[in-house]
Image (cartoon, rainbow, N blue to C red):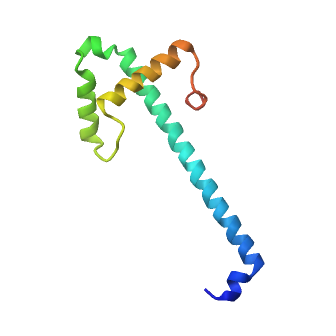
Amino acid sequence: MSKLIKTDNEYKEWIGELKQRIRQSQIKAAVKVNTELLRLYWSIGSDIVRLKAEAKWGTNIMSQISLDLKEEFSNLGGFSETNLRYIKRFYLFYGQNQRVPYPVLKK
């Protein structure tokens, strides 16, 4: 790149604005992804509680759910047995206290 372009104030301002827009878009995308993950985790937790999964299918059901989801979605993380238990707790905590996180309510 020529020195003339790098020293041009209009160009510098434009590049600065462009970089800022890119950063803002990255943040917005991350927020949207996280919102969708919250909705997914909420619905999984709701299903586990609603179906009374552990009472119906036994205490090892979380392990089986984890194995089945990992088999199908091997490129994704977040479906360990431990995480599924956290997902259930997340749902139970906010469901019982009626303090549902805002992004989960917003549809």
Quadrant that contains the N terminus: bottom right
The residue furthest right is 9
How many marks the image carries: the answer is 0
Q: Viewed as shown, does residue 56 lie left or right of 23?
A: left
Q: Viewed as shown, does residue 61 lie left or right of 18?
A: left
Q: Of residues 63 and 53, which is closer to you in this image?
A: 63
Say which quarter of the image contains residue 40: top left
Q: Viewed as shown, does residue 37 lie left or right of 1?
A: left
Say which quarter of the image contains residue 24: bottom right
Residue beneath the point at 26% across and 12% down: 56
| Vertical side of 4 occupied by 11: above or below | above
Residue 11 point in image, percent of width and height = 72, 77
Residue beneath the point at 58% across and 19% down: 99
Residue 46 point in image, percent of width and height = 43, 21
| Vertical side of 53 occupied by 67: above or below | below
Quadrant that contains the C terminus: top right
Residue 6 point in image, percent of width and height = 68, 82
Residue 75 point in image, percent of width and height = 31, 47
Residue beneath the point at 30% across and 16% down: 53
